[in-house]
């Protein structure tokens, strides 16, 4: 069954938006996680028409964020870019704009201050998201990316940041690849409850490739306990779409239809049976 399965576009990075939409339809997937760059290539109006014409849901738009800079001009530009991302998410009917907080500015070593700037930026953006009917999803990232991409490294940190703001405006993204190592993460997932705005799947494989950015594996090929993660997400009450988001050069080089067929089988085996908990 694929009733909640969504193909995040980065999993089939060689596909255009049109190809990804058609691939979802061929595989019987009901949803797609859209990236802004492929949308920009064809234009927002065309992208909206294609998605609607295919009968797909947009599970999320990726990505906003990258607002940890110190320079006031850069911070204002980041805010304006995030407003454009929110407009796109609203037009596509996506419930969530995924936020990657950003890393440390060049020469900066103060993680705490960078996290606080991210929190301030989210607070400034939150009412704008609400006005457009979109929720912001703070995505904590594995600590290996703290310097250049995501100064928010744990679900606990992301949840603490989100809880400063109304639940209908700001939540958190639960990504197995980024969070599998975090102490007590399943308990934190349960505590997140209705703050969870997206559940994303990818495995942690070893040895890591030379490019750490491309180190995500197909679910089932690595070390993550997807059953335990999924039970925790189900216990938290999350009922939204579930995205498979994989950055991996070998998977990108494979035929897209084969990749989608594999991830659908893995979803059916590793995730679907744990979405409904016994009463």
Image (spheres, helix red, strand yellow):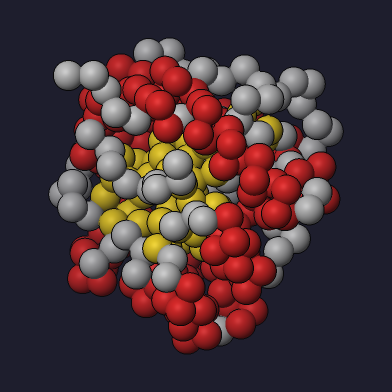
Q: Where residue 186 sits in the image (x, y, percent)?
A: 36, 19
Q: Does the rendering let one see residue 270?
A: yes
At horizontal 74% and vertical 20% (from top left) the residue drawn is 206
Left or right of 246, for residue 70: left
Work out whether 183 lies above or below 214. Answer: above
Give coordinates of residue 146: x percent, y percent.
Answer: 57, 35
Classify residue 253 as left or right of residue 197. right
Regarding residue 103, the answer to whether it shows in the image is no
Residue positioned 63% across, 53% down in the render: 10
Q: Quadrant of the C terminus?
A: top left
Quadrant in which the N terminus appears: top left
Residues 117 and 174: in front is 174
Q: Residue at x 66, y 22 (%)?
A: 222
Q: Is residue 17 left or right of residue 64?
A: right
Residue furthest top in the image: 183
Q: Which percent across, then down, holds residue 194?
A: 21, 39
Question: Which of 157/212 is in front?
Answer: 212
Total number of numbered labels?
A: 0
Residue at left offset 44%, top offset 57%: 30
Residue 251 % position (x, y):
76, 44
- Residue 240, above or below 78: above
Q: Is residue 260 above or below residue 207?
A: below
- Is 218 placed left or right of 81 in the picture? right
Q: Quadrant of residue 113?
A: top left
Nearest the eye: 107 or 4: 4
């Amino acid at each position: 069954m694929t009733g909640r399965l969504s193909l995040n576009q980065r999993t089939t990075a060689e596909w255009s938006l049109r190809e990804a939409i058609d691939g979802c339809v061929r595989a019987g997937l009901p949803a797609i996680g859209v990236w802004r760059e492929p949308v920009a290539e064809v234009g927002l109006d065309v992208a909206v028409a294609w998605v609607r014409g295919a009968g797909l849901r947009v599970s999320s738009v990726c990505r906003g964020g990258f607002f940890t800079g110190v320079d006031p001009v850069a911070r204002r530009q980041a805010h304006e870019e995030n407003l454009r991302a929110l407009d796109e998410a609203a037009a596509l009917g996506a419930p969530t704009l995924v936020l990657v907080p950003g890393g440390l500015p060049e020469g900066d070593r103060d993680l705490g201050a960078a996290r606080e700037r991210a929190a301030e930026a989210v607070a400034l953006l939150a009412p704008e998201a609400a006005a457009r009917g979109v929720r912001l999803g703070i995505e904590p990232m594995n600590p290996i990316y703290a310097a250049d991409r995501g100064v928010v490294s744990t679900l606990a940190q992301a949840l603490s940041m989100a809880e400063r703001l109304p639940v209908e405006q700001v939540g958190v993204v639960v990504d197995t690849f980024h969070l599998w190592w975090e102490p007590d993460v399943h308990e934190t997932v349960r505590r997140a409850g209705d703050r969870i705005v997206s559940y994303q799947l990818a495995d942690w494989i070893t040895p890591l490739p030379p490019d750490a950015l491309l180190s995500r594996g197909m679910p089932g090929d690595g070390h993550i306990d997807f059953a335990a993660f999924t039970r925790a997400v189900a216990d938290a009450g999350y009922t939204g779409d579930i995205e498979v988001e994989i950055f991996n050069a070998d998977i990108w080089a494979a035929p897209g239809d084969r990749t989608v067929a594999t991830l659908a089988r893995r979803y059916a085996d590793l995730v679907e049976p744990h979405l409904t908990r016994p009463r």
